[in-house]
Image (cartoon, helix red, strand yellow):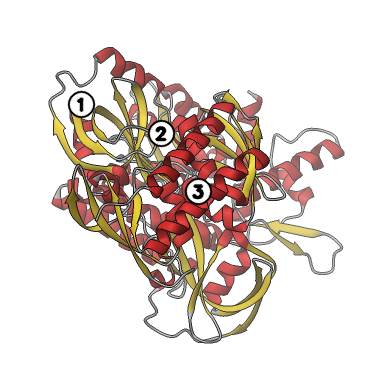
């Protein structure tokens, strides 16, 4: 097959370049490696595709000007490819068992697969999303590693700072840097603007707490002076908003919340539709009333009917690229190496999630590869016995060894393993936990050259306490009951069959089947959760229907929703970022595409954004926003509870 020939050619070029003791010209490579097309132009184009594929895989192909010649040579240094990382079979097994508790929304787990030979299969269904590190410019990571100052533009203002590390919070990645005054400040990585330039070296002050550069909650972002607000509303809603010192009052409660960002608190309360209101100080209550009045008066002039209910087509499976097939081969060989170089073919296929025929075909292709003259003694030693269900390899090639990674991938790998330990550590047998920690230690040691002590990455993806109960219920097929504080539906008890837990943009969610069908629940709005018998929870047919719809893409990218277009000034963008995390994408010129869960959700967002935003939404959402605003204004006009 043409695909096998392309893969064979790519592997052979990799092997000859990593085995050579001197740079090879393209003529030498083309003459030595079989499978290139005839004709000079066709051969050169094919060679360029091979170079592109290798570099696209993260394999550095070095170009060297040959002495005394006007031509260049190519080679791959083993030290640029190999990573000194060897897991014992027990350590590899412990990592795979732990990784089986999750899959990774942004593909972070594939770093472990493609570079370290660690495979995982989803077991207990949790999905989390390691914050997107792709926005971190290479200049920044290099400056972190080398302890150099950086200059950049942030929110239109030139800045110079001493970078200390990266901090993940609320689904975002922030650069933590020290200013000239010695203060630690945070800068969102996706908002760093060119020119970004490294400057002079500096010496880091020891013991700086990177986590202190950002508060634990957006309400505490320093915009205003610290103020304590007394809030009244249902107990569950107050608890979801983080109010403390709850005191029962009538059917609800009164609690206290501290904030240094009053506008964000008001936007949050507006989105709750009047269920939670400020009682004191009076100035805050009056400020919220003024905001609601202004927002209501601006609806007609700043918002128009538009948007639509749309169902986004599911992605079709596309053919695997040559790079993906090469990575799969490397992953297969690394996996076999971690298993003592031999395994049952069916075991390897199951671990990789592929048909046995596909795995056998890939390995048989590898057995035809090697270095010139491609005689049996220099071919890659791979034996596949389909009848005996057996595969054995004996390779010293970097193709079968853990791969070096860059700083970003190194951070992803370590953050992934940290999340795995946090999520699965309590459920592993003591000996497996020891092996898991040993594997983590080896990874930290092996990756130290990429990260160094100076490059600190903090990921605040703490597991909510509800996860333990929900995981147990999912595995046991049981149901759960809890109180739910939703701004968009009745606050009260829910009785559901949990099917999936996932994290998106710093928030944790439950996907569950209930009497009204499957839906999401934010875990920070759940309280008083307990596992209950399955009798009367939800019918088996409804559970099966929900499970059949349960695909990773459904949860992490709203395939069915209400589309809105929002134009927001910088202040409104902060509110949009907070209230619509994970559900909007920037377009251009201050415009954003938002996918709403429902018309009620869209109404709360429209009213919370207020006069600082405009756009298009459904007629139903705009009508609900007017109704919601009028209800809040009426409630604020009434005398609040003591």
Which is more N-terminal, label 3 or label 1?
3
Q: Position of residue 571 (x, y in %)?
A: 58, 58
Label 1 sits on a secondary structure element that is loop
Q: Do the residues labelled 1 and 3 touch (CB within 8 Å)?
A: no
Report the disc number at residue 477.
1
> Is residue 557 at least partly visible in the picture?
no
Left or right of 436 on screen, residue 348? right
Left or right of 239 on screen, residue 364? right
**Which residue is labeled 2 in the image?**
352
Which is more N-terminal, label 3 or label 2?
3
Report the disc number at residue 308.
none
Query: 333 or 423: nearer the eye?
Result: 423
Q: Position of residue 477 (x, y in %)?
A: 20, 26
**Which residue is labeled 3 in the image?**
292
Which residue is at 18% across, 54% downward? 247
Q: Do the residues labelled 2 and 3 touch (CB within 8 Å)?
A: no
């Amino acid at each position: 097959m043409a695909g096998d020939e392309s893969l064979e050619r790519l592997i052979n070029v990799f092997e000859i370049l990593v085995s050579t003791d001197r740079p090879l010209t393209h003529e030498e490579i083309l003459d030595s490696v079989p499978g290139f097309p005839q004709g000079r132009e066709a051969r050169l184009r094919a060679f360029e595709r091979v170079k592109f594929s290798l570099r696209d895989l993260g394999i550095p192909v070095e170009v060297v000007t040959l002495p005394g010649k006007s031509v260049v040579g190519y080679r791959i240094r083993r030290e640029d490819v190999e990573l000194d990382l060897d897991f014992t079979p027990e350590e590899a097994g412990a990592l795979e068992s732990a990784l089986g508790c999750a899959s990774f929304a942004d593909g972070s787990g594939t770093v472990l697969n493609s570079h370290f030979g660690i495979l995982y299969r989803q077991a207990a269904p949790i999905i989390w999303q390691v914050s997107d590190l792709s926005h971190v410019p290479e200049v920044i990571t290099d400056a972190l590693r080398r302890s150099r100052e950086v200059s950049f533009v942030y929110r239109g203002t030139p800045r110079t700072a001493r970078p200390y590390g990266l901090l993940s919070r609320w689904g975002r990645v922030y650069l933590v840097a020290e200013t000239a005054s010695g203060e630690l400040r945070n800068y969102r990585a996706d908002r760093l603007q060119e020119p970004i330039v490294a400057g002079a070296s500096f010496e880091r002050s020891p013991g700086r707490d990177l986590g202190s550069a950002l508060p634990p909650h957006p309400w505490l972002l320093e915009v205003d002076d610290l103020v304590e607000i007394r809030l009244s509303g249902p107990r569950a809603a107050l608890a979801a908003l983080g109010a403390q010192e709850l005191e029962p009052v009538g059917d609800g409660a009164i609690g206290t919340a501290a904030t240094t960002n009053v506008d964000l608190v008001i936007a949050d309360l507006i989105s709750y539709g009047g269920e939670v209101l400020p009682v004191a100080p009076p100035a805050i209550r009056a400020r919220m009333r003024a905001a609601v009045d202004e927002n209501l008066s601006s609806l007609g002039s700043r918002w128009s009917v538009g948007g639509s209910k749309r169902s986004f087509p599911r992605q079709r499976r596309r053919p695997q690229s040559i790079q993906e097939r090469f990575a799969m081969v490397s992953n297969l060989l690394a996996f076999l190496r971690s298993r003592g170089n031999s395994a049952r073919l069916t075991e390897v296929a199951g671990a990789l999630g592929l048909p046995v025929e596909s795995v056998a075909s890939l390995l048989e292709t590898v057995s035809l590869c090697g270095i010139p003259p491609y005689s049996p003694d220099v071919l890659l030693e791979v034996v596949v016995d389909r009848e005996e269900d057996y595969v054995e390899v004996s390779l010293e090639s970097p193709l079968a060894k853990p791969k070096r990674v860059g700083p970003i991938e190194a951070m992803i790998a370590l953050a992934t393993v940290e999340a795995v330990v946090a999520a699965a550590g309590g459920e592993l047998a003591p000996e497996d936990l020891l092996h898991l920690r040993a594997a983590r230690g080896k990874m930290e040691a092996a990756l130290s050259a990429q990260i160094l002590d100076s490059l600190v990455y903090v990921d605040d993806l703490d597991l909510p306490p509800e996860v333990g109960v929900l995981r147990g219920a999912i595995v046991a097929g049981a149901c759960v009951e809890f109180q739910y504080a939703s701004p968009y539906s009745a606050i009260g008890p829910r009785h559901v069959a949990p099917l999936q837990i996932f994290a998106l943009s710093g928030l944790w969610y439950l996907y569950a089947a209930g009497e009204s069908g499957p839906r999401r629940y934010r875990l920070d709005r759940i309280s008083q959760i307990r596992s209950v018998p399955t009798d009367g929870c939800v019918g088996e047919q409804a559970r099966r229907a929900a499970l059949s719809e349960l695909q990773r893409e459904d949860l992490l990218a709203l395939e069915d929703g209400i589309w809105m277009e929002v134009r927001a000034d910088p202040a409104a963008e902060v509110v949009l970022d907070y209230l619509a995390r994970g559900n909007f994408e920037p377009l251009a010129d201050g415009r954003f595409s938002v996918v709403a869960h429902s018309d009620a959700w869209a109404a709360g967002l429209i009213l919370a954004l207020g006069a600082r935003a405009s756009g298009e939404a459904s007629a139903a959402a705009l009508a609900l926003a007017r109704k919601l605003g009028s209800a809040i204004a009426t409630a604020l006009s009434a005398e609040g509870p003591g």
